[in-house]
Image (cartoon, rainbow, N blue to C red):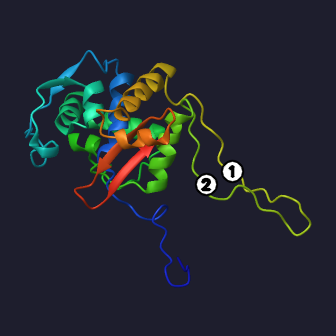
Amino acid sequence: LNYLKYQWNGATEAQVRPGSTFKIFGLAAALINNWSLEGNYFDGNSPLEVKQGRPVRNQGDTDWGEQNLMFAAKKSINTVFVDMASKLGPRKIRKAAIDAGIPETTPGFEDPNAGIVIGISAPRVVDMAGAYATFANGGTRIKPHLVKEVRRADGSLVDLKLPEPVRNVFDPAVINNVDAALQGVISPDGTGFRAMALGREAAGKTGNNEGVSIWFSGY
């Protein structure tokens, strides 16, 4: 794109609902609060009535019955995650997202309801990439930046004061369990099966903002 004609950076300026890619923070919040991804079950039927907002529906309005979070991540079952969020508390999911690197000032974070876990807030693309990188880095958070170094005419480096890494944001057990759930997404019967074409081990999550934007976040 010609910057003189188009001065909008979709990665750093656009704020778009990330849909189900936000479920990663629901997984982390559940684990932080000593819930099991395989041992705790939630309502997977559609629609699901919630206290705040309109009823939540699954893709195709599918009824899945009672399901755990590991299976719900693989199949991206909205109602399971919203039922979990309503019982755990949406503020705990917001905290996990902020800990991972999503800014506190993100639109939709002001007074979150259970829908936060299915991506009704609006972070920037670069914020989501940075937050996923926290899990890829084993729990080390690094604020995304675009410039690695700047040199003067004489070759000396300009001190850019790059952000320092924040280590141990999440316990290793949380990271390992989230990894396992997101690896299940990229499997023959997971919603991210197409990413298997990469031919390498990967973890990630699909997302759909009601057709306005389509996401895949992973590592």
Q: Residue furthest bottom?
A: 5
Residue in the picture at 35% in, 59% down: 16
Which one is in front, 196 or 37? 196
Image location (x, y in percent) of residue 62: 11, 38
The answer to whether any part of residue 91 appears in the image is yes
Residue bearing mark 2: 145
Q: Quadrant of residue 165?
A: top right
Q: Does 108 sit above or below residue 8?
A: above
Image location (x, y in percent) of residue 66: 14, 23
Q: Amino acid at mark 1?
A: Leu
Q: Does 70 sit above or below residue 75?
A: above
Question: In screen coordinates, is 79 left or right of 162?
Answer: left
Kindly check if marks 1 and 2 are in contact, taking CB atoms under 8 A apart as contact: yes
Image location (x, y in percent) of residue 6: 49, 80
Q: Does 51 sit above or below residue 53?
A: above
Helix, strand or loop at label 2? It is loop
Which one is in front, 67 or 197? 197
Residue bearing mark 1: 162
Question: In screen coordinates, is 167 left or right of 182?
Answer: right
